[in-house]
Image (cartoon, rainbow, N blue to C red):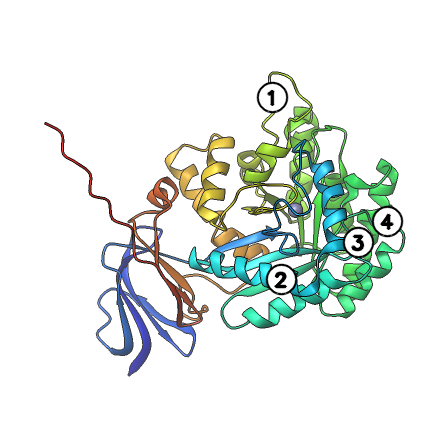
Amino acid sequence: MTFDLIVKGGLLPDGRQADIAISKGRIAAVEPGIAADAREVIDATGKLVSPPLIDCHFHMDATLSYGTPRVNASGTLLEGISLWGELKRLQSRDAIVARALDYCRQAMGKGVLAIRSHVDVTDPAFRTVEALLEVRDAIKGKMDLQLVAFPQDGWLRAPGAEAQVIRALDAGVDIVGGIPHFERTMADGAAAVRAACRLAAERGLMVDLHCDETDDPQSRHIETLAAETIAFGLQGRVAGSHLTSMHSMDNYYVSKLIPLIAEAQVAAIANPLINITLQGRSDTYPKRRGMTRVPELMAGGVLVAFGQDCVMDPWYPLGSGDMLDVAHMGLHIALMTGTEQMRRCFHMVTDAPAQVMALDFGLRPGARGSLVVLDCATPIDALRLRPARLSVISDGAVVARTTPASTEAARFG
Ligand SMILES: [Zn+2]
C-alpha cells in the first residue's frame, strides 16, 4: 500500500520513537519502521513530533490593530475595552479580514492549526461577525476556526446585546459567550450566566464565558457558571475563560469551588501572557500575579488549557501567535517547574485545548492527520527553546515549513 505521507523517525511527546503514516487526511499508523511507500516522506529523525498547537482563547476581530486609533495608556482591561469601543466603530470589514488572515498565517507557521476566537457581537454594524465568518471559510481545510458570540459590552449592560448574540448564532457563529464580571451588578452577572446557559441548552451549543477576569475575590460568577451547567445538563460543553479572581479568593472557599467546577465538567482556560500584565494593576507591593489556580484546578480533576487571548491589540502590545510562548509564561507564573509539570504545560497548548474544542487531533491511528515537527527532541525543550516548526502538517498536507536560523559564534581562548 502507498500512503500519502510518512513522517519518519520522530520522537513523540511521550518519548517513543515512531514513524507516522497518513492516508486520506487521517493517521493510518503510528509505529517504528513503517516500510510501505509514500508519495511524500519527511525525515524527522530525532525531532519532536507533536499534535498541533491549539489556541482555545483568542480575539481575532481586534488582532494586529495595536496603536489604532491610540495605545492603551493605563494598560488596564477597562481602558482596553473602551479603546476597542472606539476601534470597532472605525474599522472596515475588509480591514478585519486582512488582519485576521495575516495573523492566521503567522500562527500556522508556528504550528497552530486550530483557534477558538471570541467575536464581539455588540458592533451594531455586525462587521466583526461577518468578517470572521469570511475568515473561517477562507482558512477551512488548513486551519479550524471556532467562533464564540461574545457580547463585549455586557449581555444585560449593552442594550440589545442578547438579540445580537442570537443574530450571530443564526449567522453561523458556533458558541455562546458572555462577560458576567462586566455587568453592572453581581446579580446581573449571575442573570447573564443563566441566560447564556439557557440559550446554549436550547440550541445544543457549547458555552465559553469570559468569567471573573478581575482581582476582586468576591467575583464568583464561576460558581454560578458551574451550577447552571449542571442545572441545564451542559456538562463537558462549557468553559470558563480567565477565572483570575480565583487567584485572590479565600482558600477555604476555593476548596469548595474546585470540586463544583470538576463535577460540572467545566473546563478552565487561563491566558497567562495577558493576565500577568492586566492583573495586579491596582496593587502597590506585593503585586498579585493574577493568573487562575492552574495546578490546583488540574489536581482537582478540571480540564485546564492555556490561551493566547491577544496579539497586538487594545489589551496587549506584544505576542507572536506562538503557543509555546504562552505555555512558557504559564509555566513561570504557576511555578510549574517540576518535570511532570513542565510536560503538563506542553499538554495545555496541544491535547487539552483539543479536548476543550472537541477536535479529533492526536498522534493515534484514526485521528486527523495533523501534526508538527519541531527542531528539538522533547516537550520540555520545546518550551525552553521555542524552536522552529520545521514542518506543519494539516489533514495530511504540509501547510508551513521553516528553515532554522543558524548562528556562527566566535570560540574563546
Ligand atoms: Zn479574552
* Amino acid on which disc 3 is placed: Ala
- The x, y position of residue 143, in whole percent, is 52, 66
**Residue with the most extreme right position:** 159
* Residue lying at the far bottom of the rendered structure: 1
Marking on residue 158: 4
Q: CA distance from mark 4 to mark 1?
A: 32 Å
Q: Crowding near pointer 4: few (<14 within 10 Å), some, many (20+)?
A: few
3 or 4: tag closer to the N-terminus: 4
356, above or below 340, in the image: below
Could you tell whether 184 is left or right of 210 in the image?
right
SS at circle 1 = loop
Please state if 216 lies on the left or on the right of 18 as rendered: right
C-beta proximity under 8 Å, tags 4 and 1 = no
- Foreground of the two, 360 or 330: 330
| Spot occupied by residue 201 in the image (x, y as percentages of width and height) | 78, 60
Alpha-carbon span between mark 3 and mark 1: 33 Å
In the rendered image, which residue does mark 1 sit on?
Answer: 287
Asked if marks 3 and 2 touch (Cβ < 8 Å), the reply is no
Quadrant of the rendered image containing residue 234: bottom right
- The C terminus lies in quadrant: top left
Count all numbered tags in the image, as a single digit: 4
Q: Earlier in the sequence, mark 4 or mark 2?
A: 2
Residue 321 percent coordinates (x, y): 50, 51
Q: Secondary structure at mark 4?
A: loop
Helix, strand or loop for disc 3: helix
Residue highlighted by disc 3: 196
